[in-house]
Image (tube, coloured by chain):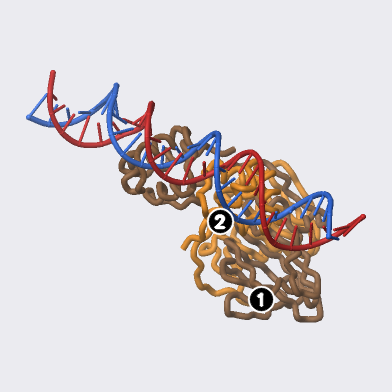
Chain colours: A brown, B orange, C blue, D red
Amino acid sequence: MEIDVGTRLRQVREAAGLSQRELARRAGVTNGTISLIEQNRNSPSVASLRKVLQGIPMTLSEFFSYEIPEEEKIVFRASELFEIASDLQGDSKGRISFRQVGDAGKHNLQILHEVYEPGSDTGRTMLQHVSVEGGVVVSGRFELTVGEQKFVMGPGDSYLFDSRQPHRFRNPFDEPCVIVSACTPPYL
Amino acid sequence: MEIDVGTRLRQVREAAGLSQRELARRAGVTNGTISLIEQNRNSPSVASLRKVLQGIPMTLSEFFSYEIPEEEKIVFRASELFEIASDLQGDSKGRISFRQVGDAGKHNLQILHEVYEPGSDTGRTMLQHVSVEGGVVVSGRFELTVGEQKFVMGPGDSYLFDSRQPHRFRNPFDEPCVIVSACTPPYL
DNA sequence: TCCTGTTGTCGAATTTTTTAAACGGTAGTA
DNA sequence: TACTACCGTTTAAAAAATTCGACAACAGGA
């Protein structure tokens, strides 16, 4: 369940030791606005909430990161891994398989069993998303491009980088490549 | 720097493979609203943005998590994986090897190449930490205990759970077991 | 070609948020 | 007791977001 925005704002404002008026002054809104938001009498626009949080200061992402734990399925058999959309192969000849462990969104951790067939390629338009990702090569070889850099990876080799850097996976070799990767937060 | 809300929404909507109307239907808003937001002609209220994201689905926190990139070492050769302290084997006979990819702390994502020799065990005092962890069995078998539940895992099987639940890894079989696992935030 | 369904955009009316200014309450000081 | 300074709340007008309905563009099928 999610706590309401008003209560959350009151929490963070008070944690910052600010009065409604003081925060309003720093944020460039009126104190009335903050009062109404905290009472959940209106739902702030993103624009104004952003301004308000700049007065704390706090990012929108931090503001909204409050969740509760829960029980879930734990073990997923080899056959139960969920094949996620891989229509991103673009101009690639070989197939790419992305099989996901469990519900990545719920846990904020995405673990994939990836198979790159010979000739496969995530495409010339580089991937980019807001995550951190890494992996270990289980078998085969592949070519990893991150930003301007190219790497050829083999069994036991591994990588870890900020996914905001443009990246691309390609298997120009003649044997399939198997990787176990992790990504947080998940990339759909 | 931050990308604008409209562009971001368009990104995630298209990544989800939804049209404006389809997303609108799922979210319970009108397509016009989504059109205007994506053009940055208005700044959605938190209430409506939340509704829209539920149609994706995506949390507000995820939606707003985009920040600035950085340069780092990316690739770690098989020989470069760092063996982290494994004095937790307790009463275990076989050795456990935890080899970490890169600097887990920096990226908030810990990826391990783990080898459980026959007879190895993380110990009777169950592990517990504030993380989410998951992994895929590359070869061999092992026994996973989470809370009250016990699982025997084989090649291709995987797991994903909240590490606050007490857990234990054990290899009572007569062949080594290799796992690639991920944990966020890292568990030292 | 026409028909049908879909796409994203746009204008006018409606609804909601934001502002600006006032209100009552509390605490400290003289 | 006043006075001052601050607190959070409230109200009516102004501003902005949302809806509703229509529009043009495009694609596929008959």
Name the foreground residue: B143 vs B132. Answer: B132
Name the foreground residue: B145 vs C6. Answer: C6
Q: Position of residue A92 (x, y in %)?
A: 77, 74
Name the foreground residue: A178 vs D12. Answer: D12
Give me the chain letter of mark 1: A
| Position of residue B153 in the picture relative to residue A64 (left or right) | right
Which quadrant of the figure has residue A157? Answer: bottom right
Quickly name the residue at label 2.
Answer: B39
Give me the chain letter of mark 2: B
| Position of residue A32 in the picture relative to residue B178 (left or right) | left
Q: Amino acid at mark 1?
A: Leu
Q: Position of residue A23 (x, y in %)?
A: 34, 44
Q: Mark 1, residues whose alpha carbon is within 10 Å: few (<14), some, or many (≥20)? A: some
Numbered disc 2: secondary structure: loop
Whether residue B186 is visible to the viewer of this picture, yes or no, is: no
Closer to the camera: disc 1 or disc 2? 2
Q: Mark 2, residues whose alpha carbon is within 10 Å: few (<14), some, or many (≥20)? A: some
Residue drawn 78% across the image and 77% down it: A119
Q: Position of residue A76 (x, y in %)?
A: 77, 52
Q: Are marks 1 and 2 in contact (CB under 8 Å)?
A: no
Q: Amino acid at mark 2?
A: Gln
Numbered disc 1: secondary structure: strand
| Position of residue A121 in the picture relative to residue A159 (left or right) | right
